[in-house]
Amino acid sequence: MSDPKTVQDGQVVSMEYTLRVDGEVIDSSEGHEPFEYIQGAGNIIPGLEREMYGMAIGESKEVTIAAKDGYGEVDEEAFIDVPRDRFPPSIPLKEGVELQVSDQSGRPMYARIHEVGDETVRLDFNHPLAGKELHFSVKVVGLRDATDEEMAHRHVHPQE
Ligand code: ZN
């Protein structure tokens, strides 16, 4: 096992992070344990993973990620018009309301009400951060080699 000095594939990276979108904090590790992931395992969005290579413990970085390297561009095909009478009365038909619906095989999917029309409601199945530029502040606070088991599962296991 190599002595982990900087972020490289096969290492468990502990990091503190804050994600801002349009100047607003969307997500942050502040007040929580640092976030842990395996570098090179596709655990985090590709644009951020790429920027993490070579960072040392204690190093911080500001990373700006274009939508296409983050949650993707807005997909026009992901808007679907549904007749108003298909919604149970318990659902407020208002722009921005988030819904869980089932696809044909019963798998849960998430959507937001994009627009409410006279006859139909337009649902948006895009990820809420699709089309957004992401601004991460990251700081590496720990590095260790992933265990063989972690590498096989491609995710971090809690350590003693
Ligand atoms: Zn596992």
Image (spheres, rainbow, N blue to C red):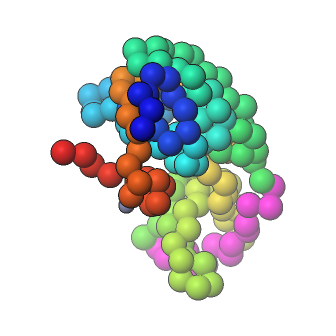
Residue shown at 32% from the left, 52% from the top: 157
Q: Is 54 located above or below residue 80 in the figure?
A: above
Q: Quadrant of residue 131?
A: top right
Q: Which residues are magenta?
A: 76-89
Q: Is residue 24 shown to the viewer in this render?
A: no
- Ligand 1 positioned in quadrant: bottom left
Q: Is residue 127 left or right of residue 107?
A: right
Residue nearest the viewer, comparing 66 with 151:
151
Residue nearest the viewer, comparing 116 with 154:
154
On the image, the x and y values in percent for residue 143 come to: 39, 30
- Is 59 colored magenta in this rendering? no
Residue shown at 71% from the left, 38% from the top: 69
Q: Is 139 located above or below residue 67 in the figure?
A: above
- Is 84 colored magenta in this rendering? yes
On the image, the x and y values in percent for residue 38 come to: 47, 43
Residue shown at 55% from the left, 49% from the top: 41
Q: Is 95 located above or below residue 21 in the figure?
A: below
On the image, the x and y values in percent for residue 111 come to: 58, 60
Furthest-right residue in view?
76
Furthest-left residue in view?
160
Q: Is residue 109 shown to the viewer in this render?
A: yes
Q: Quadrant of the C terminus?
A: top left
